[in-house]
Image (spheres, rainbow, N blue to C red):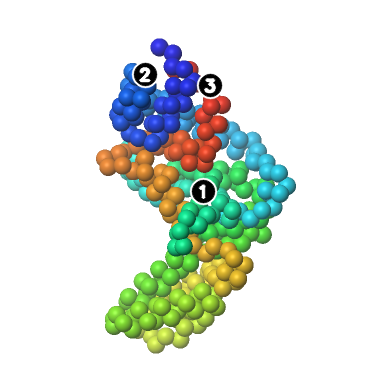
Amino acid sequence: MAISSLAQETMCFIGQHLVFSDAEQVINSLTGAGVNAKQIERICHRYGQWIEDADTKVISEQVYKEYDYQKANELHYVSVDGAMYLTREESWKESKLGRVYQPKDIVEVSPSRTELTSSTYITHLGDHKEFTSKMDYHLENLNNLVFIADGARWIWKWVERYYPESIQIVDYYHSKEHLCEFAKLYYKDENKRHDWINKLSQQILDKGIDLIIEVLEELPKQQKTTAKRNRLISYYKQNRDRMQYHRYLEKGLLIGSGAIESAHKDVLQQRLKLSGQRWTMEGFRQMAQLRVVYKSNQEHRIKQLDCVD
């Protein structure tokens, strides 16, 4: 039985929101169409694969997204991160997710809360080189980029090689987290530890990381914490230029990567990491592609596909 284009679009939309059995119930309750979960699953995976194939083709041809002159020169934030998902073939596998957005996309919804109203998402399950190729499609023709990420070396190697003129920022909260982990070992007195962390955290924001490196180097040595301290100093020195938070704040820039961490939950985990789910790698990629298409407000990509069941 042929399924109309509108029905297939509906299956994709509901199927990327809900598990297929629930999607069947919702669609049939609202439309009386009489579709079943297997049909919805098949349609969702087919559309997801077509999107994946289209992206792969563009990458292989080294074609990059075009922007008008104004947009190409506007500030764009770029954040990337990875999270682990259970697959049938390789057990836990990391899926990378990228998020590209602009300052104008950030709106204040309350005095203490902001919200991102629009973003472009990019995802890939597997090798980071294939993921960065997908990212390059969106970034190559943008001229004013700010990267915010954790300290993963593959991220910064990619950025340094292909976007050396960009601003690079290690997420402030990751840099503080490393400081807190060291302090737990070094200061047994809880009050003293909290005072030390609070003081240095503020100094990081006020003066950047250089002063913190000096403080760590001048700390009286403890045999049990020397190795940890040395690793922390090395981490800060490697990322020194990416941790000058006072300069970024003076320019009105963001210094935290919360946008990408929340995106993992909203874009991928909400559908792909439900209780008991264990995807094939192919199936994961297909469904992940549907999720990023809808979350990026790119429904037109679904409408452009002429899929016949």
Mark 1 secondary-structure assignment: loop
Earlier-in-chain disc, 2 versus 1: 2
Gap between marks 2 and 1 measured at Cα: 33 Å
Residue 195: quadrant of the picture? bottom left
In the foreground, 184 or 303: 303
Q: Residue at x 50, y 75 (%)?
A: 204
Tag on residue 306? 3
Q: Residue at x 71, y 44 (%)?
A: 68
Mark in front: 1 vs 3? 1
Q: Is residue 225 left or right of residue 97?
A: left
Question: Which amino acid, mark 2?
Answer: Ala
Q: Residue at x 55, y 31 (%)?
A: 300
In the foreground, 89 or 105: 105
Earlier-in-chain disc, 1 versus 3: 1
Q: Is residue 222 left or right of residue 165?
A: left
Q: Residue at x 62, y 67 (%)?
A: 251
Q: Which residue is mark 1?
A: 117
Tag on residue 303? none
Q: Which residue is mark 2?
A: 33
Question: Which amino acid, mark 1?
Answer: Thr
Viewport quadrant of the C terminus? top left
Q: Residues within 10 Å of mark 3 (few under 14, many from 20)?
A: few
Gap between marks 3 and 2 measured at Cα: 20 Å
Residue 182: quadrant of the picture? bottom left
Q: Position of residue 53 (x, y in %)?
A: 53, 31
Task: Examine the rendering and report whether any part of residue 94 can be seen.
Answer: no
Q: Position of residue 149 (x, y in %)?
A: 50, 59
Q: Position of residue 57 (x, y in %)?
A: 58, 33
Mark 3 secondary-structure assignment: loop
Q: Residues within 10 Å of mark 1 (few under 14, many from 20)?
A: few
Q: Is residue 277 above or below residue 97?
A: above
**Pointers 1 and 3 in contact (C-beta within 8 Å):** no
